């Protein structure tokens, strides 16, 4: 079978795969062509019955794509399926694809951007794609194609030109990373959008990392309802209907149902899949086998319990498509990208190396260097150790007295501490122990992913190593020996 994989900017990559392959084989090949190792964030889209749907990576391609005339390729779009935070992205190419995808979504009007944001993002895009304003001026390019459709007038374009001029000298990759950071604060950044109806009202349902958000479907439509994943008991699909069953708020209260009517049965299945997959990916620490084994519903029936269903005429087809959660994906990608281990490490100093007075408590990400205090890191766009790839930073909290205590993992009491939990920022564990913890042992916050720290601690900070460095714990040990 021949495939053409289109990137969001329209560029195509063509290849041939022999025999009937799984969706995953096609994605693997597409990612290999582009050098993407962080594959779990991506999916492939195609058009089926006028609906744009995700190719199920666990099912054979032939059960999903219609047979083509010989020699005519299947056209699929490479798109970001799970928009994780920019600091989780380890590779330049992945960040580039996230950028392209968001750029396309902006031009399609997905985001309800303010004028100021539109101007800022338009200028950053211009810097990414054309370089400095003086260079841009010599091309025939036009700002309007970089903007949200509701902000494409002369006055806005003038403001974009002004903002673009001020970015003079900014590297294209730095502009792109700033763009990603700005976009990641948008409400719909990580959401997939579906058109639906509730009763007679037209709505947009945004399925994102924390649950569902329901908006009026019109220009500047208001947010009508928020349904967090924690309040959902189950979701079912019956013909064109998505039924969300909410948890009881108290013992005596009745079950609450929210019904969404979609345009077709396929659209209902697609939103159902999106809800289940976003919950699995973003809110679970690992994917259980029982969940992986869910089959496709051939004849959905609301009366049946959520036991799921068996065979379709073409054999067993999987319904859900998430093999790894956000956290597992980060760990896996991290190992794939940094197979060289700690080549990146820098010596640790407890004081901020810029102001030399406050404690170094900010971890640059994704590189994992710990050198600055919060105040000094605030305006940095570049990591001072490795000089690049800093998209953002995370404040970390040490569970010990950083200057004096030892840096042995507090769980196994053996390996060196080399991780920080996200989002809470606690530092107390080694990589191996961290992967077994669903919650932070200090504050009990759910761990969305485990950030790596590339810090080389001096030997005297380890319990086992006795030195005469003047550290309390070390000198105590010396007295005993
Ligand atoms: Zn400082
Ligand atoms: Zn760095
Ligand atoms: Zn450990
Ligand atoms: Zn914590």
Image (cartoon, rainbow, N blue to C red):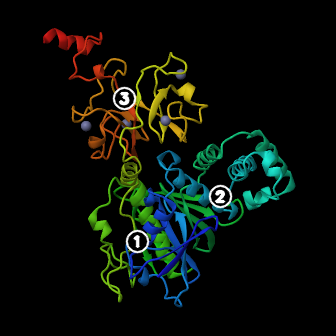
Estimate how packed mark 3 is, as few (under 14), some (14 to 19) or many (20 or more) residues with alpha carbons within 10 Å. Answer: some
Query: Mark 2 or mark 3, which is nearer the start of the sequence?
Result: 2
Q: First in sequence: mark 2 or mark 1?
A: 1
Tell me: 463 left or right of 79: left
Residues 142 and 362: in front is 142
Q: Position of residue 350 (x, y in %)?
A: 42, 21
Q: Nearer the viewer, residue 204 or 292?
A: 292
SS for tag 3?
A: strand
Residue 419 occupies quadrant: top left
Q: Does 201 sit above or below residue 238?
A: above
Mark 1 / mark 3, whichever is N-terminal? 1
Residue under pointer 2: 103
Vertical comparison of 32 with 421: above or below: below
Residue receiving disc 1: 25
- Residue occupying the far right of the picture: 154
State the count of labels. 3
Q: Which residue corresponds to the image point at 86% horizontal and 51% vertical from the top-left?
A: 155
């Amino acid at each position: 079978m021949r495939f053409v994989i289109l990137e969001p900017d329209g560029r195509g990559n063509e290849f041939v795969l022999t025999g009937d392959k799984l969706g995953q084989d096609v994605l693997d090949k597409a990612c290999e062509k582009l050098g993407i190792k962080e594959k779990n964030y991506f999916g492939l889209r195609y058009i089926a019955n006028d609906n744009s749907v995700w190719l199920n990576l666990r099912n054979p391609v032939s059960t999903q794509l219609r047979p083509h005339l010989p020699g005519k390729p299947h056209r699929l779009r490479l798109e970001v399926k799970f928009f994780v935070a920019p600091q989780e992205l380890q590779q330049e190419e992945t960040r580039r694809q996230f950028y392209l995808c968001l750029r396309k979504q902006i031009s399609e009007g997905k985001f309800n951007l303010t004028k100021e944001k539109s101007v800022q993002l338009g200028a950053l895009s211009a810097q990414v794609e054309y370089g400095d304003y003086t260079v841009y001026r010599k091309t025939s390019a036009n700002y309007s194609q970089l903007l949200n459709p509701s902000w494409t007038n002369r006055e806005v374009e003038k403001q974009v030109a002004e903002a673009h001029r001020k970015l003079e000298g900014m590297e294209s990759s730095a502009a792109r990373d700033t763009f990603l950071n700005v976009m990641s604060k948008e409400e719909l950044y990580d959401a997939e959008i579906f058109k639906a109806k509730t009763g007679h009202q037209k709505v947009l349902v945004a399925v994102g990392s924390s649950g569902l958000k329901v908006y009026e479907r019109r220009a500047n439509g208001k947010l009508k309802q928020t349904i967090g994943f924690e309040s959902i008991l189950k979701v079912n699909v019956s013909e064109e209907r998505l039924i969300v069953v909410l948890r009881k708020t108290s013992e005596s209260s009745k079950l609450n149902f929210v019904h969404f009517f979609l345009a077709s049965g396929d659209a209902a299945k697609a939103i159902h899949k999106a809800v289940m997959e976003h919950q699995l990916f973003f809110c679970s620490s690992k994917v259980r086998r029982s969940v992986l084994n869910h089959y496709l519903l051939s004849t959905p029936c609301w009366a049946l319990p959520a036991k799921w269903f068996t065979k379709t005429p073409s054999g067993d087809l999987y319904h859900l498509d998430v093999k790894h959660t956000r956290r597992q994906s980060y760990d896996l990608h991290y190992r794939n990208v940094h197979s060289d281990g700690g080549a990146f490490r820098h010596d640790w100093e407890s004081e901020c190396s810029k102001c030399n007075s406050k404690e170094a408590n900010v971890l640059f990400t994704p590189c994992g260097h710990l050198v600055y205090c919060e105040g000094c890191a605030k305006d940095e766009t570049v990591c001072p150790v490795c000089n690049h790839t800093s998209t953002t930073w995370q404040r970390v909290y040490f569970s010990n007295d950083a200057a004096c205590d030892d840096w042995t993992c507090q769980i196994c009491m053996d390996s060196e501490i080399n991780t920080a939990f996200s989002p809470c920022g606690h530092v107390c564990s080694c990589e191996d122990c961290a992967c077994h913890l669903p919650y932070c042992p200090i504050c009990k916050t759910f761990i969305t992913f485990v950030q790596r720290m590339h810090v080389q601690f001096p030997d005297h900070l380890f319990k086992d190593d006795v030195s005469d460095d003047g550290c309390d714990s070390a000198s105590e040990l010396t007295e005993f020996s």
